[in-house]
Amino acid sequence: QVQLVESGGGLVQPGGSLRLSCAASGFTFSSSYMSWYRQAPGKQRELVAGISSGGLRNYADSVKGRFTISRDNAKNAVYLQMNSLKPEDTAVYYCYGRLATLSREYSYWGQGTQVTVSS
């Protein structure tokens, strides 16, 4: 059974930091591309940051220099360190995993964790 379980969300003041964690199970994590998406009320879900199985990272322009994605293959976990948070970062953050095989591609989503940036 595939599971992606996020944790670490919460309420933080502008300028503060949070670290999100995503614990993965049930699939070959080390071979998977992992990423974080977010969805704010009334908006489409958007990619925040991604990291390949080889450690290559990509970020949305809006979070470059403030957020850092990392992974620990030994723990089957991916993290999102969020610094200098802004009110516009308020959203539900989702962990996403993608595993490509020779025959097909598998996609997995977590249930999301709420991040609220407010004074």
Image (spheres, grey):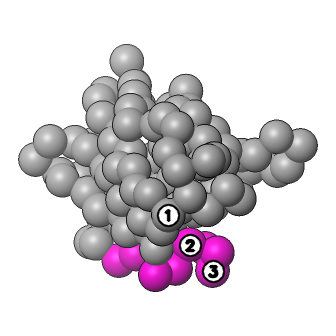
Are dots 3 and 2 in contact, CB under 8 Å? yes
Residue type at numbered disc 1 = Gly
**58 to 12, vertically: above or below:** below
Q: Look at the image and tell me whether residue 21 can be seen.
A: yes
Q: Which mark is residue 103?
A: none
Image mark count: 3
Which residue: 35% across, 77% down?
56
The range drawn in magenta is: 56-65
Q: Which mark is residue 15?
A: 1
**Residue projecting furthest to the top:** 1
**Residue projecting furthest to the left:** 74
Q: Decide which of tag 2 and tag 1 comes sooner along the chain.
A: 1
Q: Decide which of tag 3 and tag 1 comes sooner along the chain.
A: 1
Per the image, label 3 sits on a secondary structure element best described as: loop
Task: Give the Cα separation between the discs numbered 3 and 2.
Answer: 6 Å
Residue 61, image x and y in percent? 63, 80
Per the image, label 2 sits on a secondary structure element best described as: loop
Q: Residues within 10 Å of mark 2 (few under 14, many from 20)?
A: some
Residue at mark 3: 61
Residue type at numbered disc 2 = Val
Front position in the image: 49 or 114: 114
**Residue projecting furthest to the right:** 42
Q: Look at the image and tell me whether residue 108 can be seen.
A: no
Secondary structure that dominates the magenta span: loop
Task: Give the Cα separation between the discs numbered 2 and 1.
Answer: 13 Å
- Is residue 57 a member of the stretch shown in magenta? yes
Give the quarter of the figure containing the N terminus. top left
Q: Residues within 10 Å of mark 1 (few under 14, many from 20)?
A: some
Q: Which mark is residue 63?
A: 2
Q: State which quadrant residue 53 falls in.
A: bottom left
Residue type at numbered disc 3 = Asp
